[in-house]
DNA sequence: GTGAAAGCGCTAACAC
DNA sequence: GTGTTAGCGCTTTCAC
């Protein structure tokens, strides 16, 4: 009877283990009920008489009982852990998204495990495997390219419930996603540029090939240009948005028909491009306009404020979790799954056309 | 013999559970070894013959075995999960720190659980309790005020191993921390301001009362001022660094002896203050100089580049994890613990005096 | 409404 | 080297 020994010496708190070594069995003993009843008090309170529950709660408090979630998770075959994979937290978009994810997960009693993929498909695989080993109940993730993602194929084949965030799934498929409408919103943003008088608008993108969003946003740009009879320019791809790319931008601005506006496929990039422009002696927005995409808080903080297409970042995270939870609770019955809301959730976007966008110079 | 049934039908992958239902027992059966041996192949490979190990690995691959970490964690009484509590990820300092934490943790086979406290002591308690319930082996955390932290007191009393990040523990205490020397580095930064010719330097701080770092950095400012016979000005406390505070700054700049330089206790704040200044029609650094603190990547990206005291953020995270791991592996013997390196680890800081700092206007 | 008992998947003594 | 045997802390049928 090892537990009996423990209970006796408990107050001395001799052991160095986490959770002070008090188990549910100790609580049951102290409350003079069976282990089963003690368990029920916490997991299914409605199954136990009020007075009994009170005794158990008292004992638990007295012994400073801390439930060991591991035992519960192992036995019940559902961990109530959600896996989250984001490209990086160093881009505020995803940090803001995490805030939304954390809030609703913890509020609903779910735990989280976060990994970052660094936009690298190989690392995506590895990190997802890691999450799977932890037997997460489901995942919220952003992959570099949802259309051809080894990771998503794997998840599908293993029937792991997941909801994409930011990746906008194809309406044709069965994949669940939460995002804004990348193409439409980008188109609106570029329309605003055109409305301001711009005709030569260049798109600057980060890892174009590594981001389906970037391509969708570019398509939106093309839509807007074509709708106004303007020739779309080929995209300018800048590999990393933390380095400066003055040369590329400089060459562009030095050319005969230099663009009068830049549409950057994300805000961090936009901030970098604005700096590059300044270094070239150009003023934003007087000489050149810049439009970003993301709506990170920082953009509103700088002066002039960054004009941008605004995504509801925390809400994207929160909604993705809620949807995932709904799927999890719907059970494994396929009817329930498909019946539950459409796969592709589009959240409303905003447009902040201010600071860094103005009419083009008279020329 | 439920498992036998499972093994037979396995290739059909009928079950909807995570981890395809293959257990180590199935692998052992397929490889014709005992469960114990199969286990050893993964946990203690050196204890098992090469050829046997090979058989087990083959069987595992054939069955697509995915170890259930929960079982291992529960049984071995060490979860190999590290808890991480950071104030927020929306400040890039902590996002960068997380990158360091994630890298070394996953590389050493440790899992992570992240929570954010939002600088709120009540939420700190709650989140720590959450981590404790998951039986994390140890924690890396940043608290608002290490000197009087209910959470740290609790952790100490329960003998939970932890290492502070950014909080600079008192050398007198027994608490482990990894940070730069806040006071000295701030002093150096302000010295650079003074060397540039500034005499009226104001300190702008975020949640001053909620951040011990902010106070330590202010002390460094006082040191520098006093060392040069200059009167320290009272700190300007701005509650949130995401809002604009033009009024406060405006009032300050409108006063008779307006400061010629601002020392902001973090970079985000500095970026906000620069914007405020611009809105007031002031040019940085020509009219006013601004020095930040943190060294976030973004600071180098903006134009002019943000002058700042640079912390090695990813390294702070990585070092904190390594130290924590060292403590965990030292066993619970107190001698080993105290023998292992000093408690307070100070990492080297840098100084980027450029862009936003220049000589004060002739006046 | 409550109790007894059987595990969840894995590791760690202890034999051999 | 390898196998046998107990559990880790909890949930959950199944009786009563």
Image (cartoon, coloured by chain):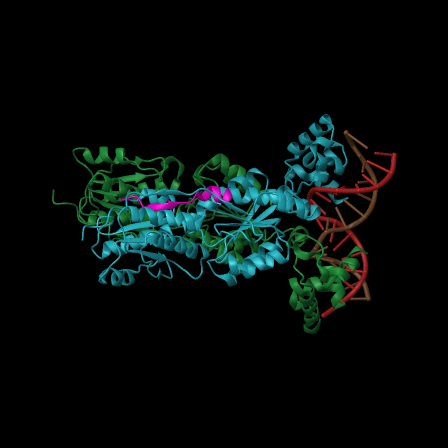
Chain colours: A cyan, B green, C brown, D red
Question: Which residue lies at the image location 39% right of the left edge and 39% below the top edge?
Answer: B211
| Observer able to see residue B178 | no
Residue B305 horizontal side relative to residue B181, left or right: left
The number of discs equals 0
Q: Is residue A304 magenta?
A: yes
Query: In the rendered view, would you say A50 is above or below B82?
Result: above
Residue B47 horizontal side relative to residue A220, left or right: right
Q: Nearer the viewer, residue A295 or B3?
A: A295
Q: Nearer the viewer, residue B100 or A362?
A: A362
Which residues make up the magenta segment?
Answer: A303-318
Q: Is residue B284 magenta?
A: no
Residue B232: give x, y in percent of width and height. Answer: 24, 38
Q: Nearer the viewer, residue A97 or B36?
A: A97
| Observer able to see residue A82 | yes
Quadrant in the picture for the N terminus of chain A: top right
**Among all residues in the image, which is located at the extreme left?**
B363
Residue A245 horizontal side relative to residue A133, left or right: left
Question: Which residue lies at the image location 71% right of the left edge and 31% below the top edge?
Answer: A46
Query: In the rendered view, would you say B322 is above or below A41?
Result: below
**Among all residues in the image, which is located at the extreme top?**
A51
Q: In terms of image quadrants, where is residue A229? A: bottom left
Residue B167 horizontal side relative to residue B72, left or right: left
Residue B30: give x, y in percent of width and height. Answer: 75, 66
Residue A134: give x, y in percent of width and height. Answer: 61, 53
Q: Nearer the viewer, residue A11 or A103?
A: A103
Query: In the rendered view, would you say B235 is above or below B292?
Result: above
Q: In terms of image quadrants, where is residue A52? A: top right
Residue A170: give x, y in percent of width and height. Answer: 52, 53
């Amino acid at each position: 009877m090892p537990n009996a020994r423990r209970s006796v010496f408990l107050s001395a708190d001799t052991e160095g283990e986490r959770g002070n070594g008090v188990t549910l069995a100790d609580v049951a003993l102290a409350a003079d009920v069976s282990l089963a009843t003690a368990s029920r008090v916490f997991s299914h309170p409605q199954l136990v008489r009020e007075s009994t529950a009170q005794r158990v709660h008292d004992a638990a408090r007295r012994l400073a009982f801390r439930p060991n979630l591991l035992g519960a998770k192992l036995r019940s075959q559902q961990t109530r852990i959600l896996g989250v994979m984001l490209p990086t937290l160093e881009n505020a978009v995803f940090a803001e998204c995490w805030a939304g994810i954390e809030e609703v997960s913890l509020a609903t009693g779910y735990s989280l495990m976060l990994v970052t993929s660094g936009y690298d498909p190989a690392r995506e695989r590895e990190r997802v495997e890691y999450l799977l080993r932890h037997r997460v109940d489901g995942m919220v993730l952003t992959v570099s390219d949802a259309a051809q993602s080894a990771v998503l194929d794997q998840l599908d084949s293993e029937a792991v419930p997941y909801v994409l965030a930011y990746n906008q799934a194809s309406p044709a498929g069965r994949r669940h996603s939460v995002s804004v409408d990348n193409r439409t919103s980008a188109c609106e943003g570029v329309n605003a540029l055109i409305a301001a008088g711009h005709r030569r608008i260049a798109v600057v993108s980060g890892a174009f090939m590594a981001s389906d969003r970037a391509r969708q946003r570019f398509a939106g740009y093309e839509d807007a240009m074509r709708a106004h009879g303007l020739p779309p320019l080929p995209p300018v791809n800048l590999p990393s948005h933390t380095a400066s790319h003055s040369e590329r931008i400089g060459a562009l601005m030095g050319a005969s028909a230099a663009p009068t506006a830049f549409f950057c496929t994300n805000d961090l990039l936009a901030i970098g491009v604005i700096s590059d422009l300044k270094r070239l002696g150009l003023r934003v927005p007087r000489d050149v306009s810049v439009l970003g995409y993301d709506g990170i808080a920082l953009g509103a903080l700088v002066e002039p404020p960054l004009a941008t297409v605004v995504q509801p970042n925390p809400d994207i995270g929160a909604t993705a979790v809620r949807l995932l939870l709904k799927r999890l609770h719907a059970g494994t019955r396929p009817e329930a799954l498909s019946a539950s809301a459409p796969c592709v959730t589009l959240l409303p976007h905003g447009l902040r056309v201010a600071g860094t966008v103005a009419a083009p110079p008279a020329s």
